[in-house]
Image: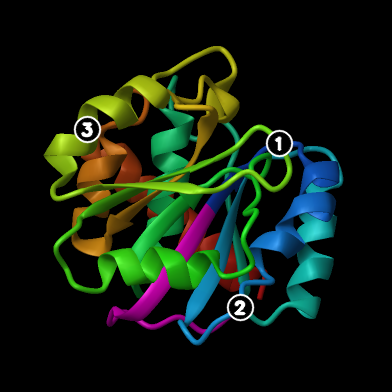
């Protein structure tokens, strides 16, 4: 297990939630990990109770990439919870950079310097949220939509991430000619952003889950 720190540093943490997506991980995760530039970053993958080859693929790739950290969401921990909220909470607890990007394993970056581009839009502190959109065709330009506050961006995020039968890979917000690929938020607002995903989970259930995940991760070091 990678060593974590509790004090936020300048840089960007990428969180990706996966469930039975071994093939997509093999194909797309290296693109998240191949960022160029001088900005520090990490990629945190939360495995939502996969029962395919996902755990094995992540374990192997973790030995190959120093910036990759993995954790997991146990199956059926609480009755009918918002799996996305729980998985995001676990991922965000593992971060230690000043901004957090929530990505999608099926929507990998199309720019090698995507970390630097995102950080340049946020480092002044004037933007709390950045939404990223890529074109439908290879080579189409990437669009970054900035918001001064999370409250301003909330309606778009809520609409794009509303709970659907497709779970994490639900309806993505359409913008111009592309699709919503990722949302980046200031770390201090990350817990507020979680509330925009799916339905709420009680504080006691979330606390119990975090303790269980911590214990199992310690035992599996």
In the displayed structure image, the side of residue 79 where residue 128 appears, left or right = left
Front-lying residue, 94 or 102:
102
Front-lying residue, 17 or 210:
17
Does dot 1 land on a helix, a strand or a loop?
loop
Front-lying residue, 57 or 27:
27
Q: How far apart are marks 2 and 3 (CA)?
A: 30 Å
Q: Residue at x 26, y 73 (%)?
A: 123
Q: Is residue 167 above or below residue 186?
A: above
Q: How far apart are marks 3 and 1 (CA)?
A: 28 Å
The residue where tag 3 is placed is 154
Q: Residue at x 29, y 27 (%)?
A: 156
The residue where tag 2 is placed is 36
Residue 2 located within the stretch drawn in magenta: yes
Q: Distance between the residues labelled 2 and 1?
A: 22 Å
Q: Which residue is drawn at 64% across and 62% down?
A: 32
| Figure quadrant of the C terminus | bottom right
The residue where tag 1 is placed is 137
Does dot 3 land on a helix, a strand or a loop?
helix
Quarter assignment of residue 1: bottom right
Does dot 2 land on a helix, a strand or a loop?
loop
- Classify 10 Å Cα crowding around label 3: few (below 14), some (14-19), many (20 and above): some
- Classify 10 Å Cα crowding around label 1: few (below 14), some (14-19), many (20 and above): few
In the displayed structure image, the side of residue 43 where residue 82 appears, left or right = left
């Amino acid at each position: 297990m990678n060593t974590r720190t509790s004090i936020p540093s300048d840089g960007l943490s990428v969180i990706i939630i996966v469930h039975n997506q071994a093939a997509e991980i093999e194909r797309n995760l290296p693109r998240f990990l191949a960022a160029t530039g001088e900005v520090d970053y990490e990629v945190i993958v939360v495995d939502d109770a996969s029962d395919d080859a996902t755990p094995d693929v992540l374990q192997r790739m973790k030995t190959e990439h120093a910036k990759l950290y993995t954790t997991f969401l146990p199956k059926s921990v609480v009755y009918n919870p918002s799996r996305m909220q729980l998985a995001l909470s676990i991922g965000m607890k593992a971060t230690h950079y000043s901004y957090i990007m929530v990505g999608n394993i099926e929507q990998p970056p199309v720019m090698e310097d995507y970390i630097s581009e995102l950080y340049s839009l946020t480092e002044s502190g004037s933007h709390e949220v950045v939404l990223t959109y890529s074109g439908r065709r290879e080579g189409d330009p990437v669009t970054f939509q900035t918001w001064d506050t999370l409250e301003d961006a909330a309606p778009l995020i809520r609409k794009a991430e509303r709970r659907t039968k497709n779970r994490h890979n639900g309806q993505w917000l359409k913008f111009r000619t592309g699709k919503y690929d990722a949302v980046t938020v200031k770390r201090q607002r990350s817990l507020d952003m979680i509330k925009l995903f799916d339905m709420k989970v009680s504080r006691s259930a979330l606390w119990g889950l975090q303790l269980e995940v911590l214990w199992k991760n310690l035992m599996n070091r």
